[in-house]
Image (cartoon, rainbow, N blue to C red):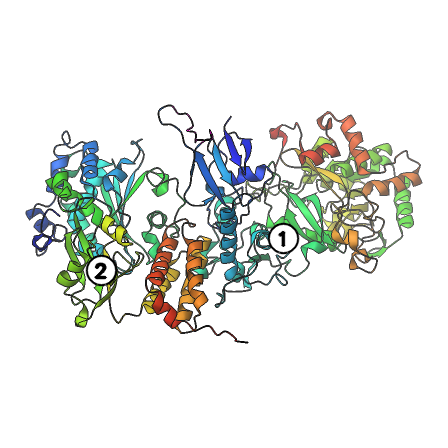
Amino acid sequence: MAQDWKSFEPLLIPDIPNLQKIDVYEENGGYDALKKIFNDQNTWSRKSVVEEVKQANIRGRGGAGFNAGLKWSFMPDPDGGPRYLACNGDESEPGTFKDRKIFEYNPHLFIEGALIAAYAMTIDTIYVYIRGEYISWVEMFQEAVNDAYEKGYLGENILGTDISIDLEVTYGAGAYICGEETAMLESLEGKRGYPRTKPPFPAQNGLWGRPTTINNIETLANVPLVINNGADWYGDIGAEEHPGPVLYGISGHVNRPGVYEYPTGVSVMDLINDVAGGIRGGKDLKALIPGGSSTPVLRADQLEGVTMNSDSLKDAGSMMGTAGMVVMDEDTDMVDVLWRIAHFYHHESCGQCTPCREGTGWLEKVLKKIKDGEGEMKDLDLLLDVGNQMEGRTICALADAAVWPVRHTINRFRDEFEARCKKSVHAVA
Amino acid sequence: MPEVFIDGKRYEYEGQPMLLQFILDQGLEVPFFCYHPSMSIPANCRQCMVKVGTPVKDRETGEFELDENGDRKIRWFPKPQTSCSTPLQDGMVVHTQETSEEIARAQKDNLEFILINHPLDCPICDQAGECPLQIQTYKYGPEGSRFEVKKVHKPKHVDLGPRVTLDAERCINCTRCVRFTEEISETNQLTIVDRGDSNYPTTAPGETFDDPYSMNTVDICPVGALTSTDFRFKARVWEMNQTPSIDITNGKGCNIDLWTRDNEVLRITPRQNEDVNDYWMPDAGRDAYKLFNENRVDRPSITLDENNQSNTSWNNAIETFAEVIEANDPSDITIVGSPHASVEENYVFNKFFNLLGVSNAKFTPHVIPGSGDGFLITDDQAPNTNGCRVINLDETDDGAIQSVVSDAKVVIILSDDLIGRDVLTSSDLESPYTISLATNISDTTKASDLVIPITCVAEHAASYVNVDGRIQRSYPAKETKYTNRRLNLEMSEGRLDRFGTNFDNWVSEENKVDCLPLWEFLNKLADRLGLEFEYNHSREIFTELSNSLDVLSNVSYDRMDEEKGVQLPIKQKEVKA
């Protein structure tokens, strides 16, 4: 890390009162990046914006961690027809609650980033899809959008240029699957949230069959930072291969749960102990889910030296995900935890394809049996086998997300599961 | 030509086929549930998984890279692929369950999933015997189940609409039914509700599934979730005979199968013909089975006094018919052919009375403007309007028929309920002596002085020309009192034909109608009248027709069999749908 994380000043959610108001945002340099580009399109051609973002290596904050600029470059050349940017604010995974901070505290940063993305990809319509349960954030964000329209940042001839971009706020009905990018497209089209088979990919065949790019809210909020300060500056923040500020959503058995902004690459233990105030009641750490409930759980003894960036977490046997860290203390019952996670995925499986529709329920029911003390040893192997039958055989990754917690929690805390299972009785002649 | 290697065998292909359809077209098998060749590909059942690899090409030269043995290097997809949604690529290598243990296991795993919440009630499920899930499970499924927790229970016996009943527990969420209403019938009446293993297809609240094509969803449901309310629990597929035929309820002539047991038609299902009806048919056509079983004219009947129709013997009927003809001048006799009768029937009807000096037969089309839907339901309510035109029957409008009838002393009507469809009134038939040659009791037969029962489409071989000018034929599916399926080589052979005994229901005499094919009755009448007129089979009639009419030259029963009907050189503008 190029700088000490403790002295890091938040960039995505800086501590500026009323930053959600457009005047305050402007007073603090808001929309400067947009003006920089729109007022000097010769320097900032659409292609050069894509290149700058690609160079900055903003890794998608929705969980997959793909280079955002590279994703933008997949859009085909304009053919005169409509093209869309679909912004994914449907965070619904247990442990993940960071986009709402942007909607609440710094919505214009995201709007500015979305506008730059739309310009870069020659897009004239932006859809922002917000989790249905976030109704108060939807209302707050809509106010920000209205202000941006009023000030001429959205709508016809933005900043007096010939560029016109519209932004529409829409919200889901509370289905986890609608956060999956192609299911979100279906939902935006007014249909049931079923993931689409790929290929074709959204860049070729997205909303209403037209080229569409899907980005996470936090990802787009990073874009003005890159334009204002340059890709090199951005690359110096945090881990080399996974740079930039990250909103860490820390929940669980810590003294100060919340959303905190720090660069990537901060030590996991620093985040738990220093940022979140340590384990509640002075207890010991037992386990950590690093990036939302689908990312594999790590035992406390696996966390030494691990930092919050993709490579380090991969080496440790997990993933960065959305940086939604769920901290569990020594008293945590891992059987209960896993059953609760399995319950969530069973409840949220859209039911479109067989292995997920049937497998998630099977996993949950067997785990419930174990949780209730009715399980048998063979059930543990059954769970792992059912997981193998699901993984990689479905249209989207929900089945994988349901399987990883089961596989890794059982493998990493097997003794707890075995202790909960009934001892097999063998007849002795 | 691009090539593909499936289970080690090389195939060439053209165009951009999808892998599953290509495999099926080669006569090979990969199990599947959700795929249907006429609808979009959701790839949601995940049963048609195969192992797929593509050859590695040198980016600069475009040549295939070779391994140390000189074989093409293959880059295998990391996961099994659903073959339904995989387009073929030149050089693609595919392993199905036949050659890949991994794929065989993946398919078995998938079937284990499908079966965990599917009730294993095959002995009572109406789909047993024609259930793809049952068949695939026997061929590719697990030997048992490791699922020892509680199954999901979804709604049962739900009347989705007037004709379709849902047993949601059996649904495997293939979405074929939903896609049918979205893509084929375009009513969008079905959708999937709820999530995960609780989901099932249904209508919007307060809506009813009354799509005029609703029963096609029963045909394409790969399990027993959607069943025909009318047919449920009436018969098992293995008890029935399946006979190809033509829908006679409108002018499209959908290709159908008649399913018979104990000499009753129990259900009608569509027969695939991409030139006519693809895989589909309207619900109304399925109801026609009742016409073949119920309300039949059974034995000749005669009106002795004003309102009293009584059955009579065939001898008396023939004698009465002959006496009426002999007692009247041919110019006082009017004959009315029918778009509801076959080409052969109209032809022999016309020919017979021509021999007696009666002028050309007339017919009036049965068209209700605006009743068609541009798909499989036509304005034309009759199956053979163009057939009447092909043999040059005199086409007249309803008013002209009425006037001709009122001038006649004898009216002979072939298979057309002219009163029921408001062409004539009962009083029009009061003064002339009226003879009906009919299959079913109708207002017209009730107003007739003599009624001769003739065979219906389910009882004879005959041809019909549809609104698009395509001639197609039917086969006998039901015995009459004078026929025997074991002697009639055109009748389909079912399990009970092969294995039934005289004590089985199959040979019951009760359901046999006392009627004759029209040509056979006319043979007898000709014999009585001393006319030279004799046919031994409708095939002879058709051969005579094809030898005499240019439009039917080169058309034969054999050709209709081979090509599922023959398109006649009729100009479309001549077709009045």
Give percent across and percent down for residue B136: 58, 52
Q: From the viewer's perspective, tell me whether residue B436 is left or right of residue A74.
A: right
Q: Residue at x 38, y 62 (%)?
A: A347
Query: In this view of the protein, can residue B395 be seen by the observer?
Result: no
Does the segment drawn in magenta span residue A24?
no
Q: From the viewer's perspective, tell me whether residue B180 is left or right of residue A19.
A: right
Magenta highlight range? B61-72
Viewer-proximal residue, A52 or B303?
A52
**Chain that bears disc 1:** B
Viewer-proximal residue, B488 or A304?
A304
Give percent across and percent down for residue A293: 30, 59
Q: Could you tell me the amino acid type at mark 1?
A: Glu
Q: Could you tell me the amino acid type at mark 2?
A: Ser
Q: Which residue is mark 2?
A: A136
Q: Is the residue B101 above or below the residue A76 in the image?
A: below
Query: Which secondary structure lies at badge 1?
Result: loop
Query: Which secondary structure lies at badge 2?
Result: helix
What secondary structure is the stretch in magenta mostly built from? loop
Task: Give residue A419's quadrant in the image.
Answer: bottom left
Q: Quadrant of the C terminus of chain B?
A: top right
Does the segment drawn in magenta span residue B70?
yes
Q: Which mark is residue B130?
A: 1
Task: Give residue A296's quadrant in the image.
Answer: bottom left
Q: Residue at x 68, y 44 (%)?
A: B248
Q: Nearer the viewer, mark 2 or mark 1?
A: 1
Q: Is the residue B454 above or below the residue B572 in the image?
A: below
